[in-house]
Image (cartoon, grey):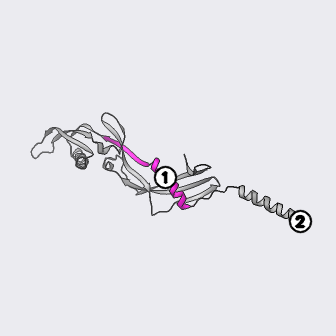
Amino acid sequence: MKKSFFALITLLALAFVGCKNVATINESEAGDVIVTYLKGNPEYKTDRFYFGEIKFNSRKEMLELEKYKTLADEGYITMTLEKGKKKFLSKDSSFVYLIKLTDKSKEFVLKQDDDKATVKVVDYVLASEKPVNFSKVNDNNAKVTVSLKKENTVFAPFQRNSSNNSDFITKTYRLKLDKEEGWKVNK
């Protein structure tokens, strides 16, 4: 009787422990979840890019013209000179260009109006050199802090507020365990 009672208790304990689904996650798995999330929901910084008919006449605007010419050389825009007044040995030269976006710039343009577009100026990607820091809140939730490296796009020179205080940002994501899909980012 004692043996059968002990066997029954052992069997019930094993069944109870076996039914409990404790989900585990480590740094590598958390990093993979974040990489998958960032592929579908990339982190980036945007700014406005002006195009259409633009007049350049002051020194500051001539520096802006050089930025446009760089984009034109790389094939992201086309520039056609509409009017140009070049005054000999004068600072008062004036140029009017018709600027158009090309198909090559499609991947950076998020929204487009008649004379301006919202473009990606910085992409943030998971930094491989800094590990993923995470803490498990409970069996079904985890908090993950990652370092995202800053990668400038071709439109980066057109940032209005280009304070470069760091080359990375830190971002915290909350992970939740889904019984069918596994760990995923909770929005």
Residue with the mark numbered 2: 2
Q: What amino acid type should be assigned to the residue bearing mark 2?
A: Lys
186 on left or right of 162: right
Question: What residue sits 75% from the left and 57% below the top?
Answer: 16
184 on left or right of 44: right
Q: What amino acid type should be assigned to the residue bearing mark 1?
A: Thr
In front of the other: 13 or 176: 13
Q: Please state the horizontal and vertical placement of residue 185, each as a whole percent of the image.
A: 54, 49
Question: What residue sits 59% from the left and 50% below the top?
Answer: 176
In front of the other: 162 or 45: 45
Question: What residue sits 46% from the left and 47% below the top?
Answer: 40
Badge 2 marks a residue whose secondary structure is helix
Q: Disc 2 and disc 1: Cα gap in Å?
A: 54 Å
Magenta run includes residue 42: yes
- Where residue 84 sits, quadrant-wise, is top left
4 on left or right of 49: right
Q: Which mark is residue 9?
A: none
Magenta run includes residue 102: no
How many neighbours does mark 2 have within 10 angstroms: few (below 14), some (14-19), or many (20 or more)? Answer: few
Q: Closer to the N terminus: mark 2 or mark 1?
A: 2
Quarter in which the C terminus is drawn = top right
Residue with the mark numbered 1: 36
Residue lying farthest to the left in this orientation: 88
Q: Please state the horizontal and vertical placement of residue 128, each as a whole percent of the image.
A: 45, 61
Quarter in which the N terminus is drawn = bottom right
Q: Is residue 103 above or below residue 169?
A: above
Q: Which residues are magenta?
A: 26-49
How many neighbours does mark 1 have within 10 angstroms: few (below 14), some (14-19), or many (20 or more)? Answer: some
Q: Please state the horizontal and vertical placement of residue 79, each as a whole percent of the image.
A: 21, 42
**Of labels 2 and 1, the one closer to you:** 2
Q: Please state the horizontal and vertical placement of residue 142, each as a whole percent of the image.
A: 59, 54
